[in-house]
Image (cartoon, grey):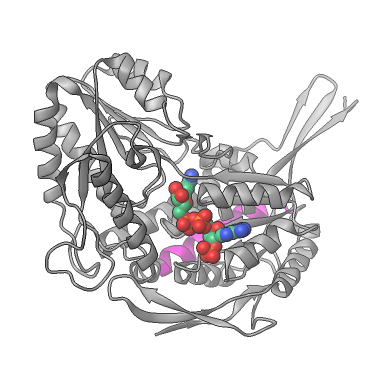
Amino acid sequence: MRSYTQFYIDGRWTSPVTPKTAEVINPATEEVSGEISLGSPADVDLAVAAARRAFATYGESSVKDRLDLLESIQAEYVRREAELGEAIMVEMGAPKGLANGFHTLLGKGHLGTAIEVLKEFKFEEQRGVTLIRKEPIGVCGLITPWNWPMNQTCVKIFPALAAGCTMILKPPQLAPYSAQILAEILDKAGVPAGVFNMIQGQGSVIGAALTRHEDVDMISFTGSEPVGVQIQKDAADTVKRVGLELGGKSAWIVLDDASLAANVAGATAGMMGNSGQTCSAGSRLLVPASRLDDVKRAAAEAANGVTVGDPQSDVAMGPVVSKSQYNIIQQYIEKGLEEGAELIAGGLGRPEGLDKGWYVKPTVFVGTNDMVIAREEIFGPVLVIIPYDDIDDAVRIANDSNFGLGGYVSGEDLDTCRAVSRRMRTGAIWVNGGFDFHAPFGGYKRSGNGREWGEFGFHEYLEVKSVIGWN
Ligand code: NDP
């Protein structure tokens, strides 16, 4: 049993002002795996005051000092990486290969990228008589979700540290352990007191207190659209900057060519990764109507081939994060059936042989873009295949969404893939796969307004000052 009942405030492990704890449930077993403390606005006040004090010096620290700090965190992160992987597996059910692989690698990648970017970043440039300075925005509230816990926290903390900001992290209640270990890593690496603070607790209490706080300059939020809307309203009175990274319903366009079956299989298996709990997942698979039979065969085979089970074993997919997430996904599968979508793999209930734990069957529907299952973010292993008539129709369907986070184009003709990628109204598009820590990541439309990752992630945490008459 893990017991993480202290917060990290002003460089010390600190008990909550008002003691209150909550159990953390392992989604693979439905059993209690440990406990955390739930903070109150009084804890937030202490952390914000510490961050404000620390900003006076850290905000003016040299690039060299910040690079040394990030490099010392990097050494400590690598030392604790296996513990982070184990924590992620227990808290949100990622299979061990994924938890110890891509999950922890993403955190390490954002750290390494922040170091690379900081080495080259121009905080000052002269244009004519004016000096343009990029200065740290100040005290930042970082609010993160549970689905890729290290990715979401590290993509905020390290650019913020590199920019010279101080911060308070509010990790998700559902995945609190990895954030606690990360706080230990930062402590051990010698982050100056007050620069990084962490308070566990409810979003509606801690997240809201940070968002409304007079002395917090900026909120960076990753999570659902409704909470993002609430955060923007809560931040309005203090006119603070709000960076929003919200949900998605991303389209994956498969072109009509010889690789169609392989591309459909890849897209289907990809959708089931992390149990479908990825904001940029290609949850709408757009395929040529004339090849629908081939598509159905390839997608059903790929979905049925996804191994589901105990995250401690060698499976492709573990459970979803919680009972409530399981129930929401089941309701969407029911909705798909009611709407008349054709079920070609998976369906209601747990996979055979798994009677305990929040396991969902890798599910594939063939439907239309006006169905609820094609319009709303399900955040589970449920793929909707939507046939298109021609490329124009595919682009029209892809763009007919309230969201605009990710997008995918798979096909043999790179020129066509590129042309399609230009027409899709989303923040990031993968053409035949690929991965880049320096590529800006964020959404159009209701998928948010921020851009994280690489150099773009730095700008979230910087103010721009003009000093006119410098020259
Ligand atoms: P939520 O929006 O429910 O929660 C996200 C965080 O916000 C949690 O820490 C939560 O706290 C906190 N929170 C809840 N209410 C408030 C409030 N009123 N004020 C401030 N903070 C609050 O999202 P989920 O955790 O369920 O994550 C899934 C969502 O995140 C999906 O929609 C997904 O698409 C999106 N997402 C977006 C990404 C992107 O980069 N665009 C990446 C990954 C996920 P608590 O611990 O109490 O829940």
Q: Is residue 111 left or right of residue 267?
A: right
Which residue corresponds to the image point at 54% horizontal and 42% vertical from the top-left?
452
Q: Residue furthest front?
A: 338
Q: Is residue 76 left or right of residue 307?
A: right
Classify residue 251 by image quadrant: top left
What residue range appears in magenta?
Answer: 60-80
Position in image of residue 1 (x %, y %): 39, 85
Classify residue 300 by image quadrant: top left
Q: Is residue 437 left or right of residue 397?
A: right
| Image vertical order of residue 67 relative to residue 187, above or below | above
Q: Residue furthest right?
A: 469
Q: Does any portion of residue 72 appear in the rendered image? A: no
Which residue corresponds to the image point at 9% horizontal and 29% vertical from the top-left?
293
Q: Does any portion of residue 350 appear in the rendered image? A: yes
Q: Magenta stretch: residue 25 in it?
A: no
| Image vertical order of residue 303 relative to residue 310, above or below | above
Q: Nearer the viewer, residue 33 or 86?
A: 33
Position in image of residue 256 (x %, y %): 18, 20
Q: Nearer the viewer, residue 190 or 347?
A: 347
| Image vertical order of residue 415 relative to residue 36, above or below | above
Image quadrant holding the C terminus, namely: top right
Main SS class of the magenta portion in the image: helix
Q: Is residue 156 left or right of residue 310?
A: right
